[in-house]
Image: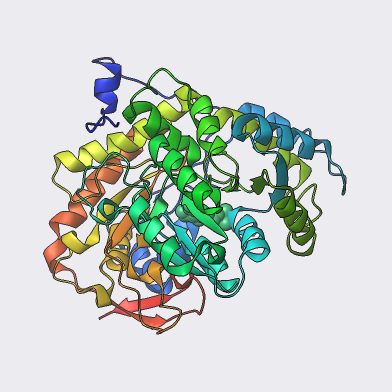
Amino acid sequence: MTNMKPMTMGQQFGRRSWAEPWKIKMVEPIKMSSRPDRERAIQEAGYNTFLLRSEDVYIDLLTDSGTSAMSDRQWAGMMLGDEAYAGSKNFYNLESAVKKYYGYKHLVPTHQGRGAEHLISQALIKPGHVIPGNMYFTTTRLHQELAGGKFVDVIIDAAHDPLNMHPFKGNIDLDKLETLIKQVGADKIPYVSLAGTVNMAGGQPVSMENVKAVRALCDRHGIRLYLDATRMAENAWFIQQREEGYLDKKIADIVKEFCSFTDGAWMSAKKDNLVNIGGWLAMNHDDLFEATSNLVVIYEGLHTYGGMAGRDMEALAIGIEESLQDDHMNSRIGQVLYLGELLTDWGIPIVHPVGGHAIFLDAKVIYEHIPQSAFPAQTLAAQLYLDSGIRSMERGVVSAGRDAVTGDHRYPKLELVRLTIPRRVYTQAHMDVVAEAVKAVYDERKNVKGLKMVFEPKYLRFFQARFAPV
Ligand code: PLI
């Protein structure tokens, strides 16, 4: 059973304000540019915020990936790097941290999340395989396809509706999954790909009840269940706040319980785990460990560093522990909710309920006069940059790419712009500035026209595509 009315941070903490559980020890200056400078910069970047230079950006909400501020303990850990080629002591610290907090038996380090996705896809997927999952993620699906598989979305329908208030919009639809298993046969499904939270749906969580049920269904059919644990700590916060029986449990305990229903996980440590680079793949099955700890030496590095320096593994081991602390997660998601509440109060169309790592602006509604073929979300991200130097990211038709068989654009139901909040980096005042900028762009919405794509790379086109005004 779930509590259908998620609490706001205000309700949770009563009338008293809350504050970040840290103070600032070092600062990095940022500056606002002039409108003519921004016009030149976005034009040079082909209206793609990925192609802007960071020094031309005022508040950078492109991504929460690798953009966290590390703690003094993590920086101290960097000085303890054991840069041996083989058997670095930092690797063993990392292995212990993953085992302690996520509970998996084996660890394969990788340079970042997509390195881990590559290894698991190559090890388990054969041509003709089908991989069900709770909405696609760009790099995850591409690695599954490159290995010869086909991703099939089995998320609940509510996830595709920006206004549906379901508290766990990341859940897998058990009927869709069961129907798919019957259609293609369990032997064609190497594993179910479960992400907590679901990035492309707006950072929406999966409930404990759902993962248990998915596990039971997988067991009945002899199918493995692997987790994209990239933002699992944030997922755990939503379980703590919204699912009956979890309010008194610690985030760390909830993460471990959730993972216990899965056979392993891949991780972009650049998100939850509070480091600027790093990733891992962890699992309980010995056969997958044997296969991937062999593949890792071809693609990433030796199986005791996987593309990371010793110092990076030490910072990651410490980051894992810090990322699962309740006061960290309260302020992390509290900041996202704060921005969401400001925008909601001003009537800006965003995805509800607000998710864990970002606010998602509903570009389809904001620019209702711009057809999806003229890239409303790409347009909105460019306009927000032009207005105030704030960098955001398109999560719509450009990110969805082309159908692998027909070659046509995929037109996703969600056409969104993501304002992604880096961890421990910006203050509440920055959030106020962001909200005011979004309001200004929203008020000007009727005067804006769309974009056309003038350059399209073959893979993951959103990173490098170029656009021009129509
Ligand atoms: O960027 P990587 O290679 O460390 O991780 C890939 C990756 C896997 N899963 C999920 C859910 C992600 O969000 C993810 C990367 N996300 C990025 C870069 C983002 O901006 O959301």
- Number of numbered labels in the structure image: 0
Q: Is residue 458 left or right of residue 113?
A: left
Q: Is residue 378 left or right of residue 284?
A: left
Q: Position of residue 403 (x, y in %)?
A: 41, 78
Q: Position of residue 312 (x, y in %)?
A: 70, 42
Q: Is residue 388 left or right of residue 329?
A: left
Which quarter shows the C terminus?
bottom left
Q: Residue at x 37, y 33 (%)?
A: 238
Q: Residue at x 55, y 43 (%)?
A: 262
Q: Is residue 386 above or below residue 410?
A: above
Q: Position of residue 372 (x, y in %)?
A: 24, 73
Q: Residue at x 18, y 72 (%)?
A: 370
Which quarter shows the N terminus?
top left
Q: Nearer the viewer, residue 295 or 313?
A: 295
Q: Is residue 392 at least partly visible in the picture? A: no
Q: Is residue 465 at least partly visible in the picture? A: yes
**Quadrant of the rendered structure where residue 352 is?**
top left
Q: Nearer the viewer, residue 202 or 335?
A: 202
Q: Is residue 424 above or below residue 364?
A: above
Q: Is residue 411 above or below residue 98?
A: below
Q: Is residue 460 left or right of residue 177?
A: right
According to the image, what is the colour scheme of the structure?
A: rainbow
